[in-house]
Amino acid sequence: MAYVIPLWTPPALPIAGSGDTFPVRRIFCVGRNYVEHQKEMGGDGREQPFFFIKSEFSLVPNGGDVHYPAKTTNYHYETEMVVAIGKGGRRIQAKDATSHIFGYGVGLDMTRRDLQQLGKDKGRPWDFGKNFDEAAPCAALTPAAKVGHPSKGTLSLAVNGKERQKADLSDMIWSVPEQIEYLSQYYTLEPGDIIMSGTPAGVGPVQPGDELVAHIDGLTDLRVKIVPAL
Ligand code: MN
Protein backbone atom coordinates (compact mmCIF):
# COMPACT_ATOMS: atom_id res chain seq x y z
CA MET A 1 0.00 0.00 0.00
CA ALA A 2 1.25 3.46 -0.87
CA TYR A 3 -0.11 6.97 -0.79
CA VAL A 4 -1.41 7.84 -4.25
CA ILE A 5 -0.32 11.46 -3.94
CA PRO A 6 2.80 12.72 -2.15
CA LEU A 7 2.36 12.88 1.62
CA TRP A 8 2.75 16.37 3.07
CA THR A 9 4.67 17.23 6.17
CA PRO A 10 2.75 18.84 9.02
CA PRO A 11 3.02 22.62 9.25
CA ALA A 12 5.34 23.54 12.12
CA LEU A 13 6.54 26.58 14.04
CA PRO A 14 10.19 27.05 14.99
CA ILE A 15 11.23 27.30 18.63
CA ALA A 16 13.08 30.50 19.46
CA GLY A 17 16.77 29.87 20.14
CA SER A 18 16.60 26.23 19.05
CA GLY A 19 16.72 24.16 15.89
CA ASP A 20 13.60 22.28 16.99
CA THR A 21 10.07 22.80 15.68
CA PHE A 22 6.53 22.49 17.03
CA PRO A 23 4.19 20.63 14.65
CA VAL A 24 0.80 22.35 14.40
CA ARG A 25 -2.40 20.30 14.44
CA ARG A 26 -5.24 22.86 14.54
CA ILE A 27 -5.60 26.62 15.00
CA PHE A 28 -8.38 27.72 17.34
CA CYS A 29 -9.10 31.45 17.46
CA VAL A 30 -11.06 33.38 20.07
CA GLY A 31 -13.26 36.19 18.78
CA ARG A 32 -14.03 39.45 20.57
CA ASN A 33 -11.83 38.81 23.61
CA TYR A 34 -11.00 42.49 24.28
CA VAL A 35 -13.74 44.98 25.29
CA GLU A 36 -12.54 47.85 23.08
CA HIS A 37 -12.32 45.53 20.06
CA GLN A 38 -15.90 44.30 20.71
CA LYS A 39 -16.98 47.94 20.56
CA GLU A 40 -15.13 48.75 17.33
CA MET A 41 -16.80 45.67 15.78
CA GLY A 42 -20.21 47.13 16.66
CA GLY A 43 -20.85 45.38 19.99
CA ASP A 44 -21.61 46.88 23.39
CA GLY A 45 -18.48 45.45 25.02
CA ARG A 46 -20.45 43.05 27.23
CA GLU A 47 -20.80 39.93 25.10
CA GLN A 48 -19.05 36.62 25.79
CA PRO A 49 -16.16 35.69 23.48
CA PHE A 50 -16.47 32.64 21.19
CA PHE A 51 -14.25 30.48 19.00
CA PHE A 52 -13.68 29.76 15.33
CA ILE A 53 -11.03 27.68 13.54
CA LYS A 54 -8.39 28.27 10.88
CA SER A 55 -6.51 25.59 8.97
CA GLU A 56 -2.96 24.87 10.11
CA PHE A 57 -2.01 25.16 6.42
CA SER A 58 -2.67 28.91 6.59
CA LEU A 59 0.48 29.47 8.71
CA VAL A 60 3.14 31.83 7.31
CA PRO A 61 6.63 31.83 8.85
CA ASN A 62 8.22 34.93 10.37
CA GLY A 63 9.78 37.18 7.74
CA GLY A 64 7.57 35.76 5.01
CA ASP A 65 5.63 37.49 2.29
CA VAL A 66 1.85 37.47 2.65
CA HIS A 67 0.01 37.73 -0.66
CA TYR A 68 -3.01 40.02 -0.75
CA PRO A 69 -5.79 37.41 -0.78
CA ALA A 70 -8.41 36.76 -3.42
CA LYS A 71 -11.96 38.12 -3.37
CA THR A 72 -11.52 40.92 -0.83
CA THR A 73 -11.15 44.68 -0.86
CA ASN A 74 -10.92 45.02 2.93
CA TYR A 75 -8.04 42.87 4.22
CA HIS A 76 -7.32 43.40 7.94
CA TYR A 77 -4.63 42.57 10.50
CA GLU A 78 -5.45 41.36 14.03
CA THR A 79 -2.44 41.01 16.36
CA GLU A 80 -2.75 38.15 18.85
CA MET A 81 -0.78 36.11 21.36
CA VAL A 82 -0.49 32.50 20.22
CA VAL A 83 -0.74 29.75 22.86
CA ALA A 84 0.75 26.37 21.95
CA ILE A 85 -0.74 23.28 23.58
CA GLY A 86 1.90 20.71 24.49
CA LYS A 87 -0.26 18.30 26.49
CA GLY A 88 -3.80 17.44 25.40
CA GLY A 89 -6.89 16.94 27.49
CA ARG A 90 -10.61 17.45 27.80
CA ARG A 91 -12.61 19.35 30.42
CA ILE A 92 -9.42 21.02 31.64
CA GLN A 93 -9.96 23.33 34.61
CA ALA A 94 -8.54 26.84 34.40
CA LYS A 95 -6.41 26.22 37.48
CA ASP A 96 -4.69 23.30 35.71
CA ALA A 97 -4.51 24.90 32.26
CA THR A 98 -0.93 26.17 32.29
CA SER A 99 0.40 22.62 32.69
CA HIS A 100 -1.01 21.94 29.18
CA ILE A 101 0.84 24.85 27.55
CA PHE A 102 4.15 24.34 25.75
CA GLY A 103 4.80 27.98 24.96
CA TYR A 104 3.77 31.27 23.42
CA GLY A 105 4.26 33.29 20.24
CA VAL A 106 3.11 36.32 18.29
CA GLY A 107 0.57 35.79 15.51
CA LEU A 108 -1.67 37.65 13.10
CA ASP A 109 -5.29 36.57 12.58
CA MET A 110 -5.54 37.98 9.04
CA THR A 111 -9.13 38.61 8.03
CA ARG A 112 -11.08 39.29 4.84
CA ARG A 113 -13.31 41.72 6.75
CA ASP A 114 -15.79 42.19 3.90
CA LEU A 115 -16.37 38.43 3.57
CA GLN A 116 -16.61 38.05 7.36
CA GLN A 117 -19.26 40.81 7.39
CA LEU A 118 -21.17 39.05 4.60
CA GLY A 119 -21.19 35.90 6.74
CA LYS A 120 -22.51 37.85 9.73
CA ASP A 121 -25.20 39.58 7.65
CA LYS A 122 -26.44 36.33 6.13
CA GLY A 123 -26.00 34.12 9.19
CA ARG A 124 -23.42 32.03 7.35
CA PRO A 125 -20.10 30.57 8.57
CA TRP A 126 -17.04 32.81 8.93
CA ASP A 127 -14.66 30.47 7.10
CA PHE A 128 -14.26 32.55 3.94
CA GLY A 129 -13.52 35.62 6.05
CA LYS A 130 -11.08 33.96 8.44
CA ASN A 131 -9.75 30.70 7.01
CA PHE A 132 -7.94 31.15 3.70
CA ASP A 133 -4.43 30.97 2.19
CA GLU A 134 -1.72 32.62 4.31
CA ALA A 135 -4.22 33.84 6.93
CA ALA A 136 -2.10 32.95 9.96
CA PRO A 137 1.42 34.41 10.05
CA CYS A 138 3.17 33.27 13.27
CA ALA A 139 6.60 33.93 14.76
CA ALA A 140 8.74 31.37 16.58
CA LEU A 141 7.39 29.98 19.85
CA THR A 142 9.09 30.66 23.15
CA PRO A 143 8.76 27.78 25.63
CA ALA A 144 6.90 28.53 28.87
CA ALA A 145 9.98 27.09 30.58
CA LYS A 146 11.76 30.27 29.43
CA VAL A 147 9.09 32.99 29.37
CA GLY A 148 6.65 31.70 32.00
CA HIS A 149 2.92 32.21 31.36
CA PRO A 150 2.42 35.84 30.25
CA SER A 151 -0.79 37.34 31.68
CA LYS A 152 0.30 40.96 31.35
CA GLY A 153 2.65 42.91 29.13
CA THR A 154 2.39 45.03 26.00
CA LEU A 155 1.00 43.74 22.71
CA SER A 156 1.47 46.11 19.78
CA LEU A 157 1.47 46.34 16.00
CA ALA A 158 3.21 48.81 13.71
CA VAL A 159 2.36 49.16 10.02
CA ASN A 160 5.15 50.88 8.06
CA GLY A 161 6.59 52.05 11.36
CA LYS A 162 3.34 53.63 12.60
CA GLU A 163 1.67 52.17 15.69
CA ARG A 164 -1.81 50.78 14.93
CA GLN A 165 -2.59 48.50 17.89
CA LYS A 166 -1.43 48.73 21.49
CA ALA A 167 -2.91 47.03 24.53
CA ASP A 168 -1.99 44.95 27.54
CA LEU A 169 -2.47 41.19 27.71
CA SER A 170 -4.27 41.75 31.01
CA ASP A 171 -7.08 43.43 29.02
CA MET A 172 -8.29 40.04 27.75
CA ILE A 173 -11.88 39.22 28.77
CA TRP A 174 -11.17 35.48 28.97
CA SER A 175 -7.65 34.81 30.27
CA VAL A 176 -5.64 32.09 28.54
CA PRO A 177 -6.51 29.50 31.27
CA GLU A 178 -10.19 30.43 30.95
CA GLN A 179 -9.98 30.00 27.16
CA ILE A 180 -8.50 26.53 27.61
CA GLU A 181 -11.19 25.60 30.15
CA TYR A 182 -13.96 26.72 27.78
CA LEU A 183 -12.51 25.22 24.61
CA SER A 184 -11.70 21.87 26.22
CA GLN A 185 -15.34 21.43 27.16
CA TYR A 186 -16.19 21.37 23.45
CA TYR A 187 -13.07 19.75 21.95
CA THR A 188 -10.48 17.26 23.09
CA LEU A 189 -7.37 19.40 22.92
CA GLU A 190 -4.38 17.65 21.38
CA PRO A 191 -0.64 18.33 21.48
CA GLY A 192 0.09 20.62 18.53
CA ASP A 193 -3.12 22.64 18.80
CA ILE A 194 -2.56 26.37 18.99
CA ILE A 195 -4.91 29.10 20.18
CA MET A 196 -4.93 32.66 18.84
CA SER A 197 -6.07 34.46 21.97
CA GLY A 198 -7.86 37.47 20.47
CA THR A 199 -7.00 40.94 19.26
CA PRO A 200 -7.39 44.34 20.93
CA ALA A 201 -8.83 47.46 19.31
CA GLY A 202 -7.21 49.19 16.36
CA VAL A 203 -7.73 46.61 13.62
CA GLY A 204 -7.57 47.99 10.11
CA PRO A 205 -6.80 47.37 6.44
CA VAL A 206 -3.47 46.73 4.77
CA GLN A 207 -2.31 47.02 1.15
CA PRO A 208 0.48 45.45 -0.92
CA GLY A 209 3.79 46.98 0.12
CA ASP A 210 2.83 47.37 3.79
CA GLU A 211 5.29 46.05 6.37
CA LEU A 212 3.87 44.76 9.65
CA VAL A 213 5.77 44.30 12.91
CA ALA A 214 3.81 42.64 15.71
CA HIS A 215 5.25 42.64 19.22
CA ILE A 216 4.49 41.06 22.60
CA ASP A 217 6.82 41.66 25.53
CA GLY A 218 9.15 38.69 26.10
CA LEU A 219 8.39 36.97 22.77
CA THR A 220 9.91 37.04 19.27
CA ASP A 221 8.62 39.92 17.11
CA LEU A 222 6.67 38.89 14.00
CA ARG A 223 7.54 40.69 10.74
CA VAL A 224 5.70 40.17 7.47
CA LYS A 225 5.26 42.10 4.26
CA ILE A 226 2.03 42.28 2.26
CA VAL A 227 2.75 41.62 -1.42
CA PRO A 228 0.54 41.72 -4.52
CA ALA A 229 -2.05 38.99 -5.09
CA LEU A 230 -1.03 35.76 -6.79
MN1 MN B 1 -8.91 37.53 15.87
Image (spheres, helix red, strand yellow):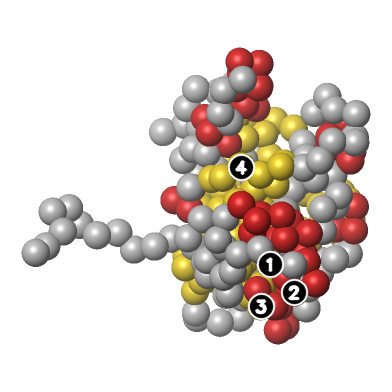
Marks 3 & 2, CB-CB < 8 Å contact: no
Q: CA distance from mark 3 to mark 1?
A: 20 Å
For label 4, count other residues whose C-alpha is less than 10 Å away and answer few (under 14), some (14-19) or many (20+): some
Q: Earlier in the sequence, mark 2 or mark 4?
A: 4
Identify residue for label 4: 52
Decide if ligand 1 comes within 8 Å of the CB at mark 4: no
Residue type marked 4: Phe
Assign the C terminus to one quadrant of the image: top left
Residue type marked 3: Pro
For label 3, count other residues whose C-alpha is less than 10 Å away and answer few (under 14), some (14-19) or many (20+): many
Marks 2 & 1, CB-CB < 8 Å contact: yes
Query: Whole-percent x and y of residue 77?
Result: 68, 40
For label 1, count other residues whose C-alpha is less than 10 Å away and answer few (under 14), some (14-19) or many (20+): many
Marks 4 & 1, CB-CB < 8 Å contact: no
User: Which of the 4 image quarters holds residue 16?
Assistant: bottom right
Up-down relation of residue 90 to residue 133 (above or below): below
- In the displayed structure image, the side of residue 83 where residue 12 appears, left or right: left
Up-down relation of residue 1 to residue 187 (above or below): below
Q: Earlier in the sequence, mark 4 or mark 1?
A: 4
Q: CA distance from mark 3 to mark 4?
A: 25 Å
